[in-house]
Image: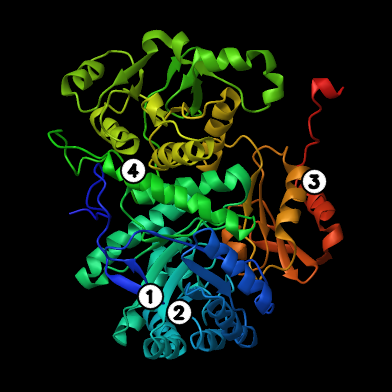
Amino acid sequence: MAMKYCPSYFKYSPRSTREVSVGGVGIGGDHPIRVQSMLTSDTRDVGACVQEALALVEVGCEIVRVTAQTRKIAQNLQGIVEGIRAAGSEVPIVADIHFKPDAAMEAAKWVQKVRVNPGNYADKKKFQVLEYSDEEYQEELERIDEAFSPLVKRCQENGVAMRIGTNHGSLSDRIMNRYGDTPLGMVESALEFARIARSHDYHELIFSMKASNPKVMIEAYRLLAARLQEEGADWNYPLHLGVTEAGDGEDGRIKSAIGIGSLLADGIGDTIRVSLTEDSVYEIPVAQALVKWIGAEGARFDLDGVPFDEDQLSYDPFVFNRRPSKQTNVDAYALGGEQAVRIVSSVKVFDEVKGRLESLGEFQPEIVVENAGTAIRMLDPTDAAAVEQINALSEEVLVAVADETALPVVAAYRLLASVLEVRHPILLKDIFSDEEQADSDADLLVGSARIGSLLCDGIGDAVWVRGEKEAEASLRLAYNILQSAGTRIFKTDYVACPSCGRTLFDLQTTTQRIRETTGHLKGVRIAVMGCIVNGPGEMADADFGYVGGAPGKINLYVGKEAVKFNIAEAEAVDQLVGLIREHGKWVDAPVMASEK
């Protein structure tokens, strides 16, 4: 029987987990989805950390994480926790640990949860190409057991929970050798550490599988959930969701909504953190909106009396492949097959923007629904007779779910893809009725979660955003969803981590400078990283990387390879431009006709 990662692909059913207590805040079990964030302040500045933590609590943050790079820095956690408690807050504090086991041992004296990254914790990570025999692999595991077990025992003694948090960008040599830079490697990396914890009868565990690419992140969490189920009923640990290095502004919110929203719709996720390259308080409303959305979405799942095969999924949920529809033409645009995913709008939207198309730049309207005639069909996938009628057509048509369909968007389109002949391309809509419209921020997140998750399932040959009330906003959101899902790249793509106490330069200001300088480089991917913790791996898909190497000093990367070191921050953006030129990917910014 094939692996299954959730109870139902078509009906919202939260994954059943055990409860893990983090300083009195329950995660998993019957508890609501918890919202958390991470301090951007330097851990050595106790006062700043206390004030930032209290500001987060004020806006609804339920768990606060703070980095602890070394044992000496981890000692400051005592003062931070005491300062927060003195101010009257009982918010749980989590120590973020990467390379230093002694820092973790110190942190576990003071905090309510410790996060460890298996790829960085006392492990080899030199990107060497090695061949491990079974004996050598076992020796590596024994070495990790020796390094990790003292922390497990201390957490157990102190009543401290633990997050085993794998990052796509920081897999060990051992894992890379055996599993590659893959979702499977991410999962196995976490399970190695979990087995050590369980060998000491320690179960206060939470898992995460973070990546900057939503497709990788979604596949890794699904695979983790399936593997935990295979391991046995008592492996039902809660999951922490997040898209790492999501970025800032609309792009960061859209990418986070795609990754987190997709998994929430699957019933996966017990606590979430939205990682934005902005002040941490701005992460909380986004996370809260996603939690609110899935609560409302889950209440709308009603498949009673609908005939469908629960296992009749049209795609492999563990491996991304685009649904192989046939190419056809709609309103003079080719779509389906290998063609780009097209943007669809109404004639009302087109009429509103047609007089200023040049000013829209890349956000151009393409197919107009009213001009397409019978080339676009609306279909209720629960109506077997209507489905049979479409499947009997000799010519391919673009098919969308009809507004009157009673199912939520994601479930409806998954069902459509499973009952519609694969030759017919599919048009994705973010809402089924005008009554679903809310405020613009909610529209952006809901549209991204719904359309983006389906694109990451490989479903969709065209998208139609209707939830945004403004014409230009609807076009911009449609294109940005395609970009963030990695479906259609039309502008520079950025991988930008959120600030934290490890950051070695002003990440927000620098990211904006780089955007202003390079934002016209269509299809170029640039990583902006505050430090090297998640560095080369998260930059694996990037063409170029801008990484903090030391205070005030920047290292520049091409792919995973560092090529320039210790550049003064004042010169680093110019040198990045020079590096892009050197590799033949620089073009001058276009001049608008109005500027000539």
- Could you tell me the amino acid type at mark 1? Gly
Alpha-carbon neighbours of circle 2 within 10 Å: few (<14), some, or many (≥20)? many
Alpha-carbon neighbours of circle 3 within 10 Å: few (<14), some, or many (≥20)? few
On the rendered image, what quadrant is the C terminus found in?
top right
- Residue 244 in the image, given as x and y percentages of width and height: 54, 58
Q: Which residue is under mark 3?
A: 581
Query: What is the distance, in whole Å, between disc 3 and disc 1 at their CAs?
Result: 54 Å
Tag 1 and tag 2, C-beta contact below 8 Å: yes
**Element assignment for label 1:** loop
- Could you tell me the amino acid type at mark 4? Ala
Instruction: Name the side, left or right, on which 119 lies relative to 578.
Output: left
Q: Which residue is under mark 4?
A: 296
Query: What is the distance, in whole Å, between disc 3 and disc 2 at their CAs?
Result: 48 Å
Disc nearer the start of the sequence (3/4): 4
Alpha-carbon neighbours of circle 4 within 10 Å: few (<14), some, or many (≥20)? few
Q: Which residue is under mark 2?
A: 112
**Element assignment for label 4:** helix
Query: What is the distance, in whole Å, between disc 4 and disc 1 at their CAs?
Result: 27 Å
Residue at point 42%, 25% (across, down): 336
The answer to whether residue 152 of the structure is visible from this angle is yes
- Could you tell me the amino acid type at mark 3? Arg
Mark 1 or 2, which is nearer the eye?
1
Instruction: Name the side, left or right, on which 17 lies relative to 83.
Output: left
- Residue 349 in the image, given as x and y percentages of width and height: 54, 18
Q: Which residue is under mark 1?
A: 24
- Could you tell me the amino acid type at mark 2? Gln
Query: What is the distance, in whole Å, between disc 4 and disc 2 at their CAs?
Result: 31 Å
**Element assignment for label 3:** helix
**Element assignment for label 2:** loop
